[in-house]
Image (spheres, rainbow, N blue to C red):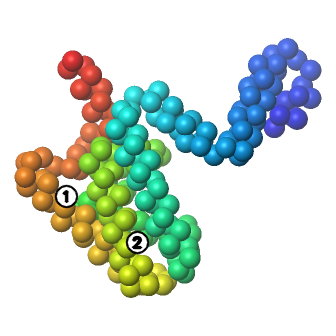
Amino acid sequence: MLRLIQSVPSPKAEPIKRWLAKVGYERMQELADPSQTLNRARATWKKQGYSEKWIQQRMMGQETRNKLTDYWQEHGVKEGQEFAILTNIIHQEWAEVSIKEHKELEGLKSQNLRDHMSEAELIFTALAELSTRQIAETGNAIGMDENTDASKKGGAIAKNARQALEEKTGKKVITQANYLARQKIIESEK
């Protein structure tokens, strides 16, 4: 892309050339030091209005997710469609709504659901995925069928925890408002 833009002999192309060179340089730096990628993600979420606590929960949840998908990949689950099916099973079990229904509830279309979850939703998602991985590891689950069973059991653990919290607080964990919408309401009330 940079080479193509460089071939355009126009002063209007100069800002694009500089931007592409800067982005390319930043990505090369991130290859040399991957922690810069994490710092960039943190900075992006911060600019979008997320709290430090939310960012920490999101990053912890991503690490938990990565460990689960690594397990699946190493134990006969095919990336793509099968990952999506198992992820939906886990979500359906703990949240009692599918991922599609949860996205619709929060008014999302193509956005990443996790980027619009509350801290509690992120924590219960991570608990469900952690439980699923540990159950799968304990039973040495291989392939779709065995990992489906582990996914249902892992999701059920998070569901029980969610229901216990809802009973104690009288508040639903899954709501219509997405995280950023909630933050704007809180800030306007201050």
Q: Quadrant of residue 159?
A: bottom left
Q: Look at the numbered disc 1 and give the secondary structure of its residue.
A: helix
Report crowding for label 2: few under 14, some 14 to 19, many 20 or more residues within 10 A (C-alpha).
many
Q: Is tag 1's residue or tag 2's residue first in the polypeptide sequence?
A: 2
User: Which of the two residues, 122 or 63, is positioned nearer the viewer here?
Assistant: 63
Q: Calculate the distance from the C-alpha at mark 1 to the C-alpha at mark 2.
A: 19 Å
Task: Name the residue type under label 1.
Answer: Arg
* Residue at 33% across, 45% down: 117
Image location (x, y in percent) of residue 170:
7, 48
User: Is the residue 132 above or below the residue 163 in the image?
Assistant: below
Q: Is residue 135 left or right of residue 33?
A: left
Give the labeled residue for mark 1: 162
Residue type pointed to by label 2: Arg
**Mark 2 lies on residue:** 133
The answer to whether residue 160 is above or below residue 49 is below
Q: Quadrant of the C terminus?
A: top left
